[in-house]
Image: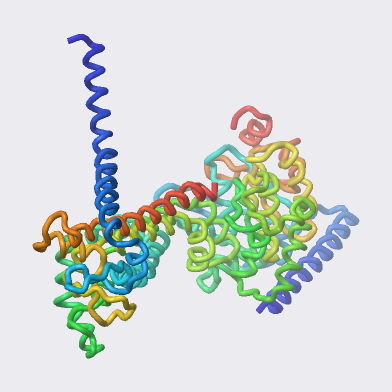
Amino acid sequence: MAEKCEVVSQTGMEIAIIEKKMETRIEKQHRIIGAEFMPDENLSTKGNVMNKIETKNVQCWYGDFHVLRDVSISVEPNTVTALIGPSGCGKSTYLRVFNRMNDLIDGFKLEGDVLIDGKDIYDKNIRVNELRKNVGMVFQKPNPFPKSIFENVAYGLRVNGVTDKKLIADTVERSLKQAAVWNEVKDNLHKNALGLSGGQQQRLCIARAIAVQPSVILMDEATSALDPISTGKIEDLIADLKKDYTILIVTHNMQQALRVSDKTAFFFLGDMIEYNDTKEIFNNPQHEHTRNYVGGRFG
Amino acid sequence: MEMNTKEKIIEGLLFACAAICVLTTLGIVAVLVIQSVQFFSEVPLKDFLTDTQWTPLFADKHFGILPLLSGTFLTTIIAITIALPIGLTTAIYLSEYASNTFRSTVKPVLEILAAIPTVVYGYFALTVVTPFLQIIFPSLSGFNAISPGIVMGLMIVPLISSLSEDALYAVPKSLREGSYALGSTKLQTAFRVLIPAASSGIIVSVILAVSRALGETMIVAIAAGQQPRLTFDPRVPIETVTTYIVQVSGGDVPHGSLEYKTIFSAGLSLFVITLILNNISFFIKKKYREQYE
């Protein structure tokens, strides 16, 4: 079981690397011939292989409340995408579309296509826990389980049927190292995780998420409860994790979006107003709402 | 009347109300201790704790509390063995699987179980459960420990399920989400995250249920047989501490006699046990409160 998991995710990783290579090659070619790089959406009917994540005309409701209207976005692999906008505009709902976390809410309804690696994740044959293993999530408030640091990171492996002690110990160590928290906790692995500081807890939660080897990581305002130093550490970490994962973050911190993201989507009252390279969104916004928001005039 | 005087009188009344509870408790303890001291001046404590027979009402008198304690613990263990799995499963179902409307309907209905008079449970054990068990185990005596034990277990199910459900429900949503986000199922989340996180509340609910079972009188008085016997065999008649007290208080034992004083020593034993349990539950509550915050 464990070996199978590894094989699957390794192939996933290889595909991502191949895709990345192809993408850079095409980009270069386009640059040489002076054309703008713009993947043609008509190329595939069910998802473009270039895109890690793609949504087409996604609409969401909580009961009668229409929270998201017609959101279409394509995300390339190994990039960081920031979702920004005022509170209550559907950013978090949109983020939670990708690991089907909204399914836990009574009365949630979704229309449209949500594709990850070209597969419709709302297809009835999709196994939701497999999907959630592939799409990790870090929450606004650090939420370690009331267990030891080691058990927190091992949890995802255990619930997915991994029993090999050595594999678990190795994965825990690797994940904590990758989440840049290993040096601070390595002597206290069997102490309760609730004794850690907020910033350490949040990096522990990141380690917990990457321990099950997802390919996408969702971060829902993951630094909003942290002090500037911890926030800086996590931003560095995001830049570092980008080489292995595709990352989507929701943030209210404009500077953070500017610092860490490649692309930014601006949400306003349930509509995705503008989606573009982060630099463009901040330096040359096309819509008045976007301009006002990133200029700090509201929100 | 002047305002100040009025205030003083009201304050005095409020104090008197609060004092009634405390004084009652002190009074009970005082009666238990005074009568027990007199009892122990005639019967050595060593005999009381080590003698294996309890026959204060017979010609050949023995004052060993062990047969009564064994009866009490036997019925309590049977009750908890029944109530813990059922109560905890019910709590998990109500808190994690049932819809809001279902939970708000079923929970009060479950709590009605706790409102049935225990004398009714007693007759239920004697006239329904025992005959039914005798079909399966023909050697079962008409009075026995297993039947009242099972019925007592059913009686305390709501105590465990209701308090445990409160404890599970109070576990922050963020922990559930954290667990689901790692690909775990509802069942895995319930057993690996929620129960450990809510363990202090669950343990407290079990201790309260144990205290309730230890002190239960009517069910065992009716269905267990009133025969003090040092045994852990659930098929034969036994007697619990509470049943013995009922038997003597209701009988024609002269007040002030040694036989009469036995009920105070028995009562004191029970009081000490439940007091210890209550303190354990208080300690757990205090130590593990809001552990996940």
Answer with the quarter of the image where residue B75 lies: bottom left
Compared to B129, does A36 lie above or below?
Answer: above
Residue A190 lies, with reference to residue B292, above or below; the image says below
* Quarter of the view holding residue B105: bottom left
Q: Give the x, y percent position of residue B196.
A: 51, 60
- Asked if residue B176 lies left or right of residue A258, the reply is left
Would residue A183 appear left or right of A225 to someone viewing this image?
right
**In the rendering, at what x and y percent does residue B4 appear?**
26, 12
Residue at x-position 37% and y-position 64%: B46
Q: Quadrant of the C terminus of chain A?
A: top right
Viewer-proximal residue among A82 and A175: A175
| Residue lying farthest to the left in this orientation | B252
Residue A137 percent coordinates (x, y): 63, 56
The residue shown at (34%, 67%) is B47
Instruction: Work out which residue is located at the far bottom of the displayed protein and give it.
Output: B138
Question: Left or right: B164 with respect to A296?
Answer: left
Residue B94: x and y in percent read 37, 61
- For image coordinates 24% across by 73% down, the residue present is B228
Q: Is residue B274 visible?
A: yes
